[in-house]
Image (cartoon, rainbow, N blue to C red):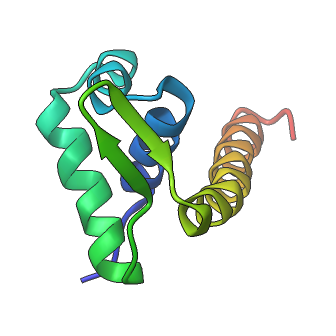
Amino acid sequence: MGFEFQDLRAALAALDQGSFRQAASALGVRPGTITFNIRRIERTIGFSLFVRRRDGVSPTPDGLSFLENARLVVEDMEALGSRSEAMRRGKG
């Protein structure tokens, strides 16, 4: 099974926040949900996104490259959603 859009959002939140716990708080979910999302990505791509430490996380070099590309995908998907909503309302 592959990963999903919400997994990318969770991983980007962890990158931005520097910890799974803070990412969970920012997204309004439990820390275990963030861990699950990130592990699903890692199983799919075959490498670790983050170095896990007691005080938080930092991206691996491969993880940073992956997450930079993931950010572009997430931004494009969010823009697509906004454009679709505008079109639905007749403003697009």
Q: In this rendering, is residue 37 above or below 82? A: below
Camera-nearest residue between 64 and 34: 64
Where residue 28 sits, quadrant-wise, is top left
Where residue 61 sits, quadrant-wise, is bottom right
Q: In this rendering, is residue 41 above or below 86? A: below
Camera-nearest residue between 32 and 51: 51
Which residue is located at x 62 percent, y 51 percent? Answer: 74
In percent of width and height, residue 89 lies at 71, 32
Which residue is located at x 46 percent, y 29 percent? Answer: 18
In percent of width and height, residue 59 lies at 52, 50
Which residue is located at x 36 percent, y 24 percent? Answer: 27
In percent of width and height, residue 85 lies at 66, 38
Report the residue that reaches farthest toward the right: 92
Q: In this rendering, is residue 48 above or below 60? A: below
Q: In this rendering, is residue 88 above or below 63? A: above
Residue 77 is left or right of residue 14, and the answer is right
Report the residue that reaches farthest toward the front: 54
In percent of width and height, residue 63 lies at 54, 62
Where residue 5 sits, quadrant-wise, is bottom left
How many discs mark residues in the rendered view? 0
Quadrant of the snapshot with the N terminus: bottom left
Residue 52 is left or right of residue 64, and the answer is left
Camera-nearest residue between 33 and 59: 59
Residue 79 is left or right of residue 21, and the answer is right
Quadrant of the snapshot with the C terminus: top right
Residue 2 is left or right of residue 83, and the answer is left
